[in-house]
Image (cartoon, helix red, strand yellow):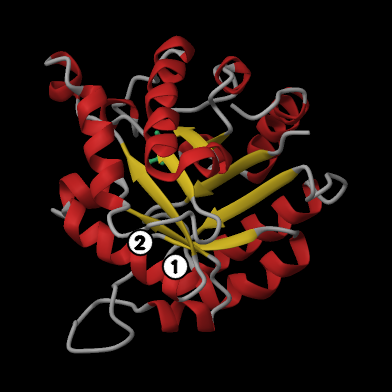
Amino acid sequence: MSKLFIGTNTKMYKTIAQTKIFLQRLGEQTADLSRDEMELFVIPSYTALESAGPICRNGGIRLGAQNMNWEDEGQFTGEISPVMLKETGVEIAELGHSERRHVLGETDAEINRKVLAAFKHGLTPLLCIGETKEQKELGIADEILRIQLKAGLNGVAQVPAPFYVAYEPVWAIGVNGEPATEGYAQEKHAVIRETLVNLFGERGRSVPVLYGGSVNPENAKPLIRMPHVNGLFIGRSAWDADRFNGIIREVLPIALSKTMA
Ligand code: PGA
């Protein structure tokens, strides 16, 4: 049986109080859904992490952080280390989100150091990759995805522990984004899967690959039907717990009926 991987990153939205209300409601709304069949995660702002920890544990929600530094401690003003994240109950480290790559200038080499640090500390890396509009138009999207995967996972010899990949085409993300069609997403997910198998052999088949970028209640079902799409990583459409719960209920039976590819 397959499993659904589904989560949201609340970006620089939601205060501590708003995050707590959101998580509480999401936990209640999805309480009847088996966590053996679904991995549900939420990635709130740093300031909300500590109070989010217990609510997530009670609600069957895995907690993630939106970024982290690769060092345990040091002279890195404004940065947060894996040790500090673990203290708050964080289990997932979201690394290389497009806003961090393209707005804040993160490089593949830095993201790679973070991936290795996440593994070292027993955090699940959620490695985000995706081509820009320009790269898509130049016809080099596949190459970009391979580069981001190979560079981001450099030095990871085996699949040492669980990790996720999120395919998020930059042109599809956010208020000005245009969602990828399910056919396009499927094609790119196939490239990602092939690259993971090249890197890790058969174990590369067990890495969940999630699609993100303007997922909404209308396109969630066609996307999850695609054989290579193992889950969804949602922004705006998941920030209302009831709406998110609605999407989860639509896609869960479809995900469970598929075998992982
Ligand atoms: P969006 O965000 O669903 O609002 O486009 C996706 C993301 O940035 O992960």
- Ligand 1's quadrant is top left
Q: Secondary structure at mark 2?
A: helix
Which disc number belongs to residue 255? none
Left or right: 56, with 34 as reference point: left
Q: Quadrant of residue 175?
A: top left
Residue 230 x/y as whole percent: 58, 32
User: Does residue 167 appear in the picture of this structure?
Assistant: no
Residue 47 in percent (x, y) is at 44, 73
Q: Amino acid at mark 1?
A: Phe
Is the residue marked by circle 2 packed among few (<14), some (14-19), or many (20+) residues within 10 Å? Answer: many
Residue 223 visible here:
yes
Q: CA distance from mark 1 to mark 2?
A: 6 Å
Q: Which residue is mark 1?
A: 119
Q: Secondary structure at mark 1?
A: helix
Query: Residue at label 2?
Result: 115
Q: Residue at x 78, y 50 (%)?
A: 35
The answer as to whether callout 1 falls within 8 Å of ligand 1 is no
> Dots 1 and 2: beta carbons under 8 Å?
yes
Q: Is residue 37 above or below residue 27?
A: above
